Amino acid sequence: MFLRAFTTASVLAISAATSAAACEISARVSIVGNEFPAIQTVGANAQACAGAEVSTNLTADHQKINVPGMQGNPAEYTSAIIANSSIVALMNEDVIRPLDDLVAQFGQDLQPTQLVTIGGQVMAVAFMANAQHLVYRSDILEAAGVEPPKTYEEMLAAAEVIRSKGLLENPVGGAYMAGWNLAQEFNNMFLGFGGQHFTPGTAEPSVNSEAGIKALEMMKALSEYMNPDFLTHDSNATNAEYRAGNVALMNMWGSRAATLVTVDGVPEEVKNGFAIAGPMTVGGGDTPASTLWWDGWTVAKNISDEEAESTFKAMMNGIDPSILENPDVPTQAVWLVEGYEPTPAAIGVFEAATSGTIPYPMLPYMGLMHTALGNELADFMQGKETAEKALADVEAAYTAAAKEKGFLQ
Amino acid sequence: MKHRTFFWFFLPTGLAMVLFIAAPIVSVLIQSVFAPHEAVFRTVENCGPFGCVQETTIDQEATQSLREAQPLGRFVGLDIYLDRGHLAVAEVGAAWANSDSLGAFFDELGDLPFYRAMAFTLTYVFVCTPALIALGLVIALAVNTLTQRLKGLVIFFSLLPMIVTPLVGSLILFWMIDSRGVLGTLIAALADNPDLSLKASTVLMWISIIIYGIWSSAPFAFVVFYAGLQTLPQDQIEAAQIDGATRWQQVRFVIIPHLMPLITFVALIQLMDNFRVFEPILGFNASAHATTLSWIIFNDLGGETRQLSAAAATSVMTITGVAILLSPVLVRTWRDFRGKA
C-alpha cells in the first residue's frame, strides 16, 4: 500500500515537473502575497519556470508592503497575490495593469469565472474561493441533543443547552479580536441582517441603522458564550481554543478548516467530532451572515512588457490544473482551477457560494470603513456604550478618514 | 575650542543629524498639511467568480491629471490636526456644550481616539517613570551590598528584562496572564473568581501594561544608578555613620543627593521613552482597552487603505508632546546656560 502510494506520488511529481518544464520565461518575476498553504503552492509552482529568476515574498504582512513595493518605477514586485478586499488598495493607487491582451495570448485555458473584470477590463485572475462558515463538534452537539444550527439564533440556543448541561463552559468561538477581525464579524452579521455599508452610489456611511444595531446585539449575545478574553482572539487563537476542545461552535474561514485538526496534539475526541457546515443566517433573513472572498493574482503596471509577459506566464504555471495532481493540494482550498473536485472540507465554502452569500464589497472606501469598525466597536462589546453610540462613533471616525483621503467632501 | 575647530569637529555629526533627524521631521510636517486629492468616482460593472455587480471605482485618468498638477496633494492646512482622529476640536466643543457634568464631558472625551490615547499614555508615563526610578535605585543599593562573587551573576539576571526584545517580553507576559495561563489562573484562584480575566478588564489591562513597563525599564535605571554608586565618596558615608545616621538617613541625605544628576538623566530618557510606548499595546493585544499615539500611527499605516496624512499629523503631535514633557528641564538648562554667559 505504502509502495503504491509512493510510486503514485513519484509519477505525479514527475508529471508536475514536466508541466513545469514547459514554462519558459525571459525576464524576472517577483511575487508578493499572503502566507497560507494554497498560496505557497501557487508560489512554488510559479518558481518552477525556467529561463529567469522567480522570487516570492509570502508573508502575513503583504498588505503593508505590496502597494509601496509596486509604486516605484520599475516596480519591485511584478505580481501581487490579493483578495477582493485588498485589490482595492492596488486599484486606488493605480499600480496594476489590465490583463486583457495577456489573457488573449496566454490565458486561453482559464475558466471565464476566474477573470476578475473591473469596468470591463481584466484586472486579476482568481484561483480560489473562501468564506467563513460553521465549524462544530458533532460529538458535543449529539451529547447536548441539538442539531447543527442553521441560524445564529439556533446557535445561541445550542450554546445555552451545552453550557447548562455542563458540557463546556464557553462553547462558542469567534475571531472577535479588536481591529480587523471584530470588524469582519460585524460585516458578516450586518449583511446577514440586510444592511448596506454605504448609501448606494456614494461614499456616505450607513451602518448606524436598524441592521447595524441588531448585528451588534447578536454579537454581544454570542460573546456571552465565549472565552472572556474574546477581544484578544484572532482566528489563530480561536482555532487553538477549538483544537484544545474548549469550543463546540464557531464561524471559521474555509481556508483554515481543512487543516484544523491535522496538527499534532489535537485530542482524539476533537478529531472525531470535527464537522463543518454552511454559513448561518440571522434574524430570519435568507442571506447568510458571511461574505464571499476570492484570492487571485495581479500584474504590476510599472514594469516592462517583457516582465509582464513573464510574470503572467509564471503565474499561469502557478495555477496550472496539474497542481491538483499532488494529493495535498486539493484540500488546501476551494480551487477555481479547471478539474478541481470539491473535497469534504470544501462543503462550507460551496454552500456559502450557492446560498446567496454576498461577496465582500470591492469599493475604494471599504478599507477605511473596515478600519473604523475595528477601532470603534470594542467599546460596545465591553458594555461601555450603547450600540447606537458605537455606530455613531464608527460613522464619525470613517467620515474623518474619508475626508482626508478625498472620498468625501 | 576655537570656532573653526569646533565647526570641522561637529560637521559630520551635524550633517548626519540634518539628514536623518531634521529632514524626516520636515517631510512629516509637510505630509501632515497635505492630503490626497479628492477622488473622482465612476460606477462600473465588476465581474468575478461570484457574478457581476455595479460598483464604484476611482477614475484613474481624471485623478491622474489632478495628481500631475499638484504632486503633493491638496493643501489642507491644519484640517487634519483638527479632525476627529486628532484634536477633534468640533467634537470637543459639542461635548462641552452638551454635557451636564464634568464626568459626562470626560466620558465623551474618552470616546475620541486622541484623548483616549493621551489618557492612557499620560497615566503610563507618570506611574511608570517614578516607579521604575525607585525600583532601579532599590536594586542598585541591594546589589551594591552583595559580596563580590555574587555581584556578576545578580547583575546579569537583573539586566535580563532589558535584554529581552520588548515585543517578545510583552508577548510572554501576555500568554502568562491569559485566563488559561499560569498567572491568569493564579490570580483567578487568589481572587476566588474563576471568571476573572485580566484581558477582559480595562483596569487590570492597564495595570498589567504598567507593571510590564516598570519591569522592562527598571534595569536601565539600575545600571545607571549602580555606576553612580561606584563613585560615592566613602568618607562622606563614614562621616554620616559617625554622626549616627541610620541606613535610611544615609540613603536619603547622602546617596540620593549624590545621584541626583543621574536621576534627572534617567527621568528625562524614560519620560521620552514612555511617552512613545508602543510594543506592549501590540504584544498584549490591548487596543480594545489602551491605545497610545504610537499605536494610532501604526494603525493608520497598517490598514488596507493607508492614511499617510493622519499618521504624519499624529507623529508631529507626538514630537510636540515629548517637547512639552521635557520643557521644564529644557528651560532650566537654557537658564543655566544664560546664567553662565
Image: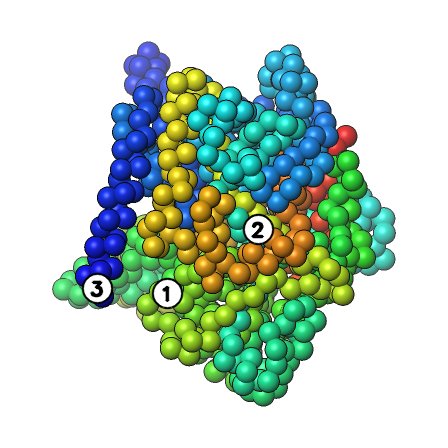
Amino acid at dot 3: Phe
Q: Is residue B334 visible?
A: no
* Residue receiving disc 1: A262
Mark found first going from the N terminus, 2 or 3:
3
Q: Is residue A24 visible?
A: yes
Residue A204 screen position, x and y as percent: 77, 39
Residue at the location (29% across, 58% down)? B160
Q: Chain of mark 3?
A: A
**Residue B310, located in which quarter of the rendered image?**
top right
Colour logic: rainbow
Q: Chain of mark 1?
A: A
Amino acid at dot 1: Thr
Q: Nearer the viewer, mark 3 or mark 1?
A: 3
User: In the image, A400: left or right of B236?
Assistant: right
- Please determine whether, in this image, residue A60 is positioned above or below residue A67: below
Mark found first going from the N terminus, 3 or 1:
3
User: In the image, A98: left or right of B175?
Assistant: right
**Residue B77, located in which quarter of the rendered image?**
top right
- Please determine whether, in this image, residue B277 is positioned above or below residue B6: below
Q: Which mark is residue A2?
A: 3
Amino acid at dot 2: Trp
Residue at the location (29% across, 65% down)? B142
Q: Residues within 10 Å of mark 3 (few under 14, many from 20)?
A: few
Residue A149 screen position, x and y as percent: 63, 72
Residue A126 screen position, x and y as percent: 51, 40
Residue at the location (63% across, 55% down)? A354
Check whether the beta carbons of the residues at disc 1 and disc 2 lie within 8 A of each other. Answer: no
**CA–CA distance in space, label 3 to label 1:** 20 Å
* Residue receiving disc 2: A180
| Front residue (pair B262, B312) | B312
| Front residue (pair B69, A327) | A327
